[in-house]
Amino acid sequence: MLDYREDGKAGVVEIAVEGRISREEFDDVAAKLEAFIASHGKVRLLEIIHDFEGIDASAFWDDLKFSLRHLNDFSRCAIVTRAKWIQPWSKLVGSIFHCELAHFEPEKIEEARAWLVRPQERGAA
């Protein structure tokens, strides 16, 4: 399941992940996120991973294509999760994107939100 929320004023999108992601869910969230990027420019993304059980194969391929199309469209990405395997994976993927990346434990979600909206330092992504 994917839960999608946006704050246009702050330029922030929050996506919560729980369980397995279907193609339909991915397509719905991707369409909303593309529209948000089109109207707001660079986006700050908060991804909250409660429990990730995988993604449909066709959605995985679409996710890869989406990511390649939007390499420069994220300025900051905060990942909130307890899953330790996510950090090395997200750092690998994050190195492809041109954005700041930070990880937070679930009890620090408000710290993650504050970090997302904090002004970026000069020269940062």
Image: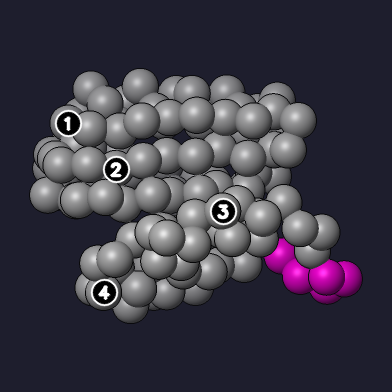
User: Alpha-carbon distance for marks 1 and 3?
Assistant: 28 Å
Is residue 13 shown above or below 24?
Answer: below
Of the image marks 1 and 3, the number of the one nearer the N terminus: 1
For the residue carrying disc 3, how many other residues have a C-alpha within 10 Å: few (<14), some (14-19), or many (20+)? few
Three-letter residue code for mark 2 = Val
Q: Mark 2 points at which residue?
A: 17
Three-letter residue code for mark 4 = Lys
Of the image marks 2 and 3, the number of the one nearer the N terminus: 2
For the residue carrying disc 4, how many other residues have a C-alpha within 10 Å: few (<14), some (14-19), or many (20+)? few
Q: Which residue is drawn at 26% across and 26% down?
A: 25
User: Alpha-carbon distance for marks 2 and 1?
Assistant: 11 Å
User: Alpha-carbon distance for marks 2 and 3?
Assistant: 17 Å
User: Alpha-carbon distance for marks 1 and 4?
Assistant: 23 Å
User: Alpha-carbon distance for marks 2 and 4?
Assistant: 15 Å
Q: Name the residue under label 3.
A: 110
Task: Decide if residue 74 is on the left or right side of residue 19.
Answer: right
Q: Quadrant of the C terminus?
A: bottom right
- Give the residues drawn in magenta, as a range: 121-125
Q: Mark 1 points at which residue?
A: 22
Residue 112 spot, x, y in % from top left:
56, 58
Q: Quadrant of the N terminus?
A: top left
Of badges 1 and 4, nearer the viewer stands 4
Residue 12 spot, x, y in % from top left:
63, 40
CB of mark 1 within 8 Å of CB of mark 3?
no
